[in-house]
Each structure stands twice: as C-alpha cells, then as structure tokens.
Image (cartoon, rainbow, N blue to C red):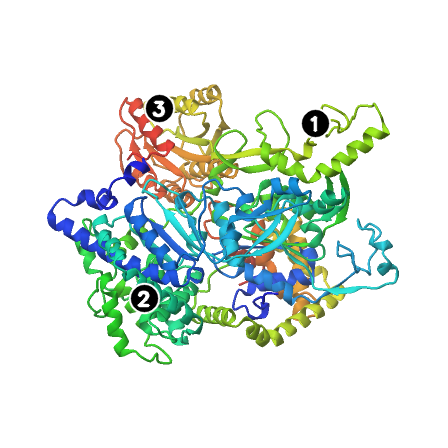
Amino acid sequence: MRAVFPFSAIVAQDEMKQALLMSAVDPSIGGVWVFGDRGTGKSTAVRALAALLPPMQVVPGCPYNCDPASDTSTCAAACAGLENKKNGRSQTVPVPVVDLPLGATEDRVVGALDLERALSHGEKAFEPGLLARAHRGFLYIDEANLLEDHLVDLLLDVAASGENVVEREGVSIRHPARFVLVGSGNPEEGELRPQLLDRFGLSVEVRTPSDLATRVAVIKARDAFDRDPDRFVEKAAEAEARDRDRITAAQKRLPTIETSDAVIERAAELCLAMGTDGLRGELTLIRAARAYACLQGDDAITDEHLRAVAPSALRHRLRRDPLDDAGSSVRVERGIAGVFGA
Amino acid sequence: MDDRVGNRPVGLSGAEASTATSAADLEDLVARGIATWDTALQIADVFAVDPLGCGGIWLQARSGPVRDAYMDLIRQRIGDDVVWRRLPAGLTDDRLLGGLDLTATLLRGQPVFERGLLSELNGGVCVLPMAERTDLGLAARLAAVMDAGAVLVERDGFALRDETRFGVIALDEATDEDDAGLPAKLSDRLAFCVDLSAVPYACVRAAVAENDDGTELLRSSRIVTARALLPDVCVPDALLEGLCEAAAGLGVAGLRPIQLAMAVTRVVAALEGRTQAEVADAALAGQWVFGPRATQIPQAAQPDDETAEQPEPEPDPPPPESPEPEQPEPDQADTEKDDENEETRQVPDALPEDMLLDIIQASLPDGLLAKLTAQMASRNATKTSGPAGMRSASQQHGRPKGTAPGQLGPGARLSLVATLRAAAPWQKLRRAQAQAKAQARSGGVSHRAGPVTAAGGDNGQRVFVEQSDFRIKRFENRSESVTIFAVDASGSAAAQRLGEAKGAVELLLAECYVRRDHVALVALRGEKADVLLPPTRSLVRAKRALVGLPGGGGTPLADGVMAALGLALAAKRRGQTPALVFLTDGRGNVARDGSKGREAGQADALAAAKILRAEGFRTIVIDTSRRPQSHAANLAQAMDALYLPLPNADALRLSSAIGGFVNGTRTS
C-alpha cells in the first residue's frame, strides 16, 4: 500500500477542503466540481479523503457495499439472504473513494459479465463495475471535461436516479449506486457539459496560492512527503484523527440541527438576488449550510453559515451574463454583499 | 514538406538564417547556436541522471540532423539498459493503457491482459513524436499516469493498477502557423524546454565527432556516479525558499515548476558530486525550469542589453533602479557557477532577498525580455492550449479516434477487430447457450434478436457475434464553422452604403454556402439588435432576410455586439467554430438599456467589444462609413478584430479578404 498525502497536511485550498468535508457529512449535497489552475493539488485532496473518512459498516461479502442497518432486500447480490446479514454481522471498511480514469471502458464503469467465469466455466455471472464499488462513497473523475460523451451520459443517469441499471450481454441487473461525484478539470480545455455541471452540488475554484509563505509551505510539505512518506503520514496522524472526529461528530449532529424559516427565507432571497435557475440552488445552499454548521459544531444554521457556503453552492448556477466580465466568484461575492450587507 | 526540410541542414533553413545576410550575422548565429547547444547538453546530462524526477524535455526542433544528434546523445547518456520507446501516432487506448489480448484470449480460453505501452515504459523514456499534434485526451492520459506513477486500468473487464514511471521527451515540430502546440497539461510536467530550431548543424558536428573519441564514455560514468549519489542529496530550506521567490518574481504559474526545479537542483548537485545542494545548483535549475516559463519581468529588472539590438525595439519596461551585474552569456553559465562556488560553499540559513532571482534573471537567454513584452501585449487574446471545444466527433471522416459501442446504421463504420475483441470472451458461453437452445427447440430457428448467424445452432458457426459487440469507428474532425453577420442598418449608415454592404454579405453568403458553413444574421436598427436569422445553412433564407432589411433609426451597437456574441457562444457550445463579421460605421448611439445618447452608446459598445475580445473568436469589422473615420477602427481595436474599410463598389475584393480570414488564413 502506497502512502497517501494526508488530507490534514494539505496547505491552503480551504474552500476545496471544506467542500469535500461537507460532502462527507451530507452526501445528499450532491458532489463537488473542482476547477482551476494546474498543479494545485486537486487530485491529492480527493485521494487523501479516502484515508481521512471515518469507516463505514457493510454486510460482509456484499459486492455493493450494502448497509447492514438498512433494508437490503433490493440488493442485486441478494445479500439479505446472506448468512452474515441474517446473523446481523457487519464489517468495518473504509469509505470507498473510486477513481474513474480516462480511458475506462463502459463495461468496467457499469459492470458487465464476469469474463473469467464466462470464458473458463461458461457461466453467466455479473461482475460489478466502478459504480457499484463507489456506492456509499465517492466517485472521482479527474479531467471530467475530457470524459467520453457516452460515459458522461451514463453517469448523468445514474447520479440522478441513484441506481445503476444494467442491460447488456444478456444480463439484467439493477443495483443502488449512490455516491458523491467529485470531478475536477480545467475549463480552458473544454467546458463541462451543463447537464453534468448541474449535477454537482458544490463547485470550488482552486488557485495557486499567491503569497510566498504559503507557496513555500506547500512545496516544503510536498518535499518532506516525497522524501519520507511514512514518517510524514505518521506526523500528520494526530491532525487526521482530529479531522476524522470532526466529521463523525458532524454526521451525528446533522439530523438534529435546527433550520429556521428565517434561514430558508434568506436562502431564497439570496438565490433570487443571484438569479440562479431552479430550486436546486436553494436546496443545495441549505444543505451545505447545514453540513457546514455541523462541522463548526453549531446547533442552528445562521446567516453566517449561509454566507460561508454560498460561493461554492451558487457559483456554477449563475446565469451567463456576458456583459459582466467579472468571474463568477466575484459575482457571487457581490450578490452576498447585496443581501447580507457588506 | 517536413521531409524536404529534414534533408537539409536545419540551422540554415531557420527563420534567423534567412535573415543572416552578412558574415557578421552568420558568425553571431553560430555563436548563439553553440551556446544553445552547450546548454542543451548540460540539460541532457541532468535528464539522463533522473529522467523520472525531471519529468522530461520539451524539445522544439524540426526533424533533422541536429535533433537526431541530440536524441542520440541523450540516449547514450541514459544508457542502453533503460527502456526507450516511441509512441506511435494514432495510438488507441488498448495499446496505450492496456486491454484484452484478443489472440491470447481466444487461444487460451480465458481472459488475457495485454499491458499497454505506458506500462512497458516503466523506468524508461517515452518519446512523443509530433508533440504539437498531441490531442488533449492523450495528454491527459499521460499526465494522469505520470502523476499516479501507475496506469489505472478499468478496461475490457480488467481492473488493475500497473505501476509505471517514466520520463517524456516531446518532439515538437510546431511552426508559427501551427496554433495548437503541446498541451499545457503535459508541458507543465516536463522540467526542460530545449529549443534547437535555430542551431546550425555546424555547431553540432564537433559534438558528434567528440563522441567518437571516448569523451562520451567519461560522461556516462559521471552520470552513473550521480545516480548513485542522488538519493542522498538534500536541498536546504533557504534554497527552496529562494526558488519559490524566483518563481513568483518571474510569474511562473503553478507549483509544479517549483517541484521540478527542486528535482533538477538535486541532480545538478549530484552531478557535481555534492550531497548538499548549493546556490549555484538552484540557480542553474531555476534558469532552466523557470526561464522558458517566465511570464513577467521582475520588478527591479534591468533591460537586457541584447534587446537593444533587436530589429524592432520593444517598449522598455520600467527603468532600472538598482545596478545589475554584467549580463552573462548563457554559455558562460559554467564559469559563473564556479565563481559562485567560491563565495557560497555553505548555504546560509536564509539567502539575501531575491539573490537567487537575480542570478536566474541575469542568466536568462537574450531575447526573452523582448518575447515577454510581446507576450504581455497579447495577453488578453485568449490562448488556450488545446481547442477542445473546436473539435467534434464524427462518424465518417477526420482523424480516427478509437472505437465506441454503437449500432450499425447509415454513416457508421464497423471496426471489425474491436468488434471481435468485444465478442471474444463470450464465445464459450454463447456456444453453450446456442447448443442448449438448439436442443430445447430442436429444429426451430432462433428468434433472438442478437446473434448474427446464418444457422440457429452452433453447427458450422465459428464466431458468435451479438449486437452488443458492435464497435463503431469514431473520427474526429475540425468542426464546421458559423459565420455571424451583424449588419448596421441605422440611419447613419447611409442608404447607399447599406446597399453595398448587402452586396458584400451576399457574396460572402455564397462562399459560406460553398464551404457548407452556417450563417446567422443580426440587424442593428432602431432601439435594439434583432437576430434576423439564427444559424442556418439555408442560403435562400439568409438572402431573403437580408433583402428585406430596411434601414433607418438609431445604432444599437452595444446590443448588436452582445447579440452576435450570444450567437457565437451558443455555436461554440455546439462544437462549432464561430466567426463574426460586423458591418458598421462604428457610431453607436443607443446604450444597452435602450436610451439614446452618443456617449453612452459608444462606451457600451466598447465595453461589449472587450468582452467579445476575451472570447478570442475570429472577428472582422468592416467600416461602412462613407469616409472612414476612427470610430469603426477603434471598435475593431477593442475587439482585437481585423479592420477593413469597405472599398467603394468593390465588394468582390472585400469578400475575398473576408473569405480568407474566416477560413483561418489571416491576411491583413
């Protein structure tokens, strides 16, 4: 197992880290789209997430990561019938963070007949793909804007329905596939299709840190890690544990946190001021604010929370205004200042 | 054409050579060539020590003896035991990343994985020919593998991680007309950029001769020693900070170059036989890695002496405030380094501020300042490194771009091998199924939609191919273009001129028709701009809309620009390449909000023009005023557009000028 750069040791890029943590607390926020400069540690952050997240419980032996506490009667592997499920046994596994590499073929993404068994035994057996592996976890697409169109279509469908329906090679299977979609890319190399962009709850823009001290800190950390990964990971262990506890606590707090009508009105007001399309903006805004408040350890959502998450939740939902040459980040800031006062 | 150039001595066919008229110029050219070549050799040493850590070399040179000599030298220095592979053009994902081995799978009756080229490259050097044509997909795949240190395979039923690390030499033969170039995501990961395009072969001959007398052997042993030393080399924090500072000062984007410079610093130190890097090592690394990436001149910069000798003097940067050391020639880097050694044997805890930056800056090659100034002037013109939105997938023509599952139908071309590959794993299974079916309904003909088979059972059938196996060839081609005409039909554009403008547009329409371009028409008239005709290929509709266009009213120029821009953006999203043609006198007198007023109208128009400019579309402004004045020219300038006054009664000449421009051969 190769050592992974620890999440807690990532210097700067606070908005991206925050967005990923919020998604971990409440997956229903709907994923994160990370865009911006090259070499800003986009991939590093996502891959680091796997090691950070608190582990989850699954039915042992179930290829679809079924939750033992939930109703698994719809599981494609029929894990409800497995001995383990009946005995109430469960297994602790890390939350999956699955990479969807460029050049992946459709059969590996959705799943297909098991080649090995088909060839050597002449048996028809379904081999789950990346979507199954990512269930209850994260699916990461680097360079999402360069992804093949037919794969994008497929992902759009699954991300919307939370279910993967496979009808190919004579196999007919459906299984739950609910995951947090994390995509990264550089819009200069081709824009993300608007439909896919819309699937992402949050969008964050990453920039190369501009001040020298931060740059030096980033390079130093990276250099220290490259020279002795194990020691570096060990040194960051304490901070990792702290962040992990924070996520666990926030996840516990989430169902009980208070969302007042005033806050919902405020969110609506903000979306109206920005001219975002549809209700998705408001919904995401509130969910994100809730997750953020939980991470902060607060008991109720306030304007402050809304304000903190509004840029990530609304940035990619602004209608294009070609006459306004300011970046979307600036426009969101302006809108926030308009509603909340500067 | 490339071949033709390749057979001639490259240096003398370069742009600089053609201007070298006098003997003095020629001498100068040779001197520069030798300097460049020497630096290139030093870089070859460093790359040979640690190809993986340095990422690679972006080698700019036409195919020819100079490049060949350089590649040979690198290869010798790296050694025979290191894998050295050339990526063939048109490589498919199967070969690049790995996939199902068709023959072995059929033979053995079990899935056999065939490793891709990138996996085979492990520990070696990947040569990327025709790098200027590298498409974004390949660049992204290479970059992902370089970052992960492994190929992540999720293909053809295989899910595995194949560890591989390699260095890249990108052979870039781009000429000025080539707009694409090496995708930035790849060049960002290569430490070095070596430009041999202006090196005459004469400079290289000596090196090739030297090669025969055993000097190379000596070098090789030095490289082996450095490799052994490399893991122990450490870079003091002061140098790290200095490099960060230098990168910031030179406006080097991103953090990866700094990491690369660190790696290079280590190698340089190792080559010098040191286990602790010194200022000189970092300076050399900074010069090589940051130099070609510099986008700005550090604040207290001294104008380069050499720039004064450039044929076109560039506007000077802010006057110098501090005296700088004498500008050293690049080929003196060695001697300079030695001087440094005496002074800075021990790296102090913190370097004097900007020390490294100053050293690096002083050693940057001549002409760079001029280049930077020119670059800064054109900074606003959007330069994306890969025109992803400008390409479209097509099923019928263009460059082949792999295969995808699909249906047979008109226009689709079946890829036989890919289809067989898809069908191969299932043969045993399908045979068994077919037999079972034949037994169950003995004599009955199979009604399954799937099998493409003459017989129902397996009697005589060799291969079972089903519809889901079909793989369709995909191609990529340059997308169709959309020409958007914005015609000023206001009262200020006199009726007579409007007629001429219409005539010009009609001629252009005919040309667009020949090229099967789409056209769209926006009219500027009254209080706002109307899209008379959304993009269409129908010449008839376009003509009708144009003829029926009455003149008169105000000039909503700003609105017109925005309307045209909106159409252009929509076209871009559809994967088309838009071009804009404005026919106007440039005297806007209606503001964006519809209110009248020359001042507001003009200001809004110029603001809109700037937004249009940021998009970088091909744009042309045709001045329709009777006596061309500055208005339309200003507008053209704000748009970074080509400006053409409408010549009197010479629509033909105009249309040929525009035609060339829209086609992409800019003639101004």
| Chain of the residue on which disc 1 is drawn | B
Identify residue type, mark 1: Val
In the rendered view, tell whether residue B663 sits above or below residue B236.
above
Residue at mark 2: B284
Identify residue type, mark 3: Ala
Residue at mark 3: B504
In the rendered view, tell whether residue A281 sits above or below residue B618.
below
The residue at 59%/65% (across/down) is A2
| Chain of the residue on which disc 3 is drawn | B
Label 1 and label 3 in one chain: yes
Q: Disc 3 to disc 2, how far (Cα)?
A: 58 Å
Label 1 and label 2 in one chain: yes
The residue at 21%/44% (across/down) is B12
In depth, the one of A12 and A300 nearer the eye is A12
Residue at mark 1: B452
Q: Is residue A165 visible?
A: no
Contact, CB < 8 Å: mark 3 with mark 2?
no
